Amino acid sequence: DFLRNLFSRTLGLGSEKREKLLDELTLEGVTRFVQSDQCKNVICLVGAGISTSAGIPDFRSPGTGLYANLQKYNLPYPEAIFEIGYFKKHPEPFFALARELYPGQFKPTVCHYFIRLLKEKGLLLRCYTQNIDTLERVAGLEPEDLVEAHGTFYTSHCVSALCRREYSLAWMKDKIFSELTPRCEKCQSLVKPDIVFFGESLPARFFSSMQSDFHKVDLLIILGTSLQGRGLDRG
């Protein structure tokens, strides 16, 4: 019902009666549909749950989630570490956390390679991910295969609206692991990975792709996310 209402509101989908496509609502029924001639375009919506078995914590699990283990950063409240206003005044906690979770230290899971398999079979229309761990890229998805709804560590930009110089993953990694606060070489403003903080808009690609993709989709697969809230779910 949640998805039906979402797509009905945002895309005008789901309001009309549609034919029954699955012979049974089981894994086997989905498998038969994927192997049929009716299934040509698959969209995957993925979140933190596909990366936790790689060793990356989610946000909110009691005791083990990221928010439950941020006391050492002396934050006013856990979510502050991902708020753009707090980051601009106090960037150090975020970059300390980034050293712990930095892309390149973890390997893709079976779920990531399942999405890669859909691509190899010519079935993947798009993968929409809430994660920022870049494991979809590591597993072999190309930028055109992905909509990184919460952004990515893959690139970084100066936060100054008058500058916005871009920096590479290697440049940011060097700064973070040298324990230096990344600053723009042109204007000395902070440089932030292109992940979406609280207080920032989702990428334009999310909205443009959603408008076109969901009118073509034959099968929607949701993995590792409730689609409610914004957690790691940022990976």
Image: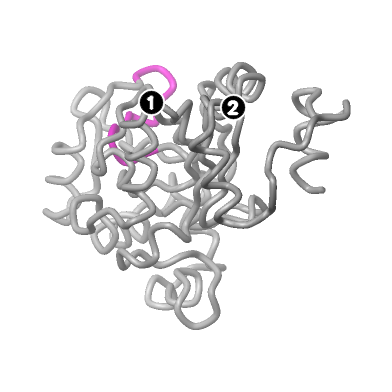
Say which residue appears at 50% left-offset and 54% top-offset.
233
Q: Secondary structure at mark 1?
A: loop
Is 24 displayed left or right of 82 in the figure?
A: right
**Which one is in front, 29 or 119?**
29
Specify which label sits upstream in the sequence, 2 or 1: 2
Please, what is the three-letter code of the amino acid marked with disc 2?
Gln
Disc 2: CA contacts within 10 A as few (<14), some (14-19) or many (>=20) = few
Across and down, in percent, residue 227 comes to 64, 50
Taking depth in this image into account, of 49 and 44 the one nearest to the observer is: 44
Residue name at image x 24 percent, y 43 percent: 138
- Magenta stretch bounds: 152-163
Q: Residue furthest right?
A: 16
Q: Is residue 156 magenta?
A: yes
Where's residue 148, x and y in %?
45, 35
Q: How is the image coloured?
A: one colour
**Distance CA(mark 2)–CA(mark 1):** 13 Å
Residue 25 pos. (x, y %): 68, 53
Q: Nearer the viewer, mark 2 or mark 1?
A: 2
Left/right placement of residue 24 relative to residue 63 reads right
Q: Which mark is residue 122?
A: 1
| Mark 2 secondary-structure assignment | loop
* Residue 125 vertical placement versus 49 (above, below): above
On residue 38, the disc is 2
154 drawn magenta: yes
Tell me residue 228's x, y (percent). Answer: 67, 53
Q: Three-letter amino acid code at disc 1?
A: Gly
The quadrant the C terminus occupies is: bottom left
Q: Residue at x 22, y 22 (%)?
A: 186
Residue drawn where x is 31% and y is 33% of the image: 141
> To which quarter of the image does residue 92 belong?
bottom left
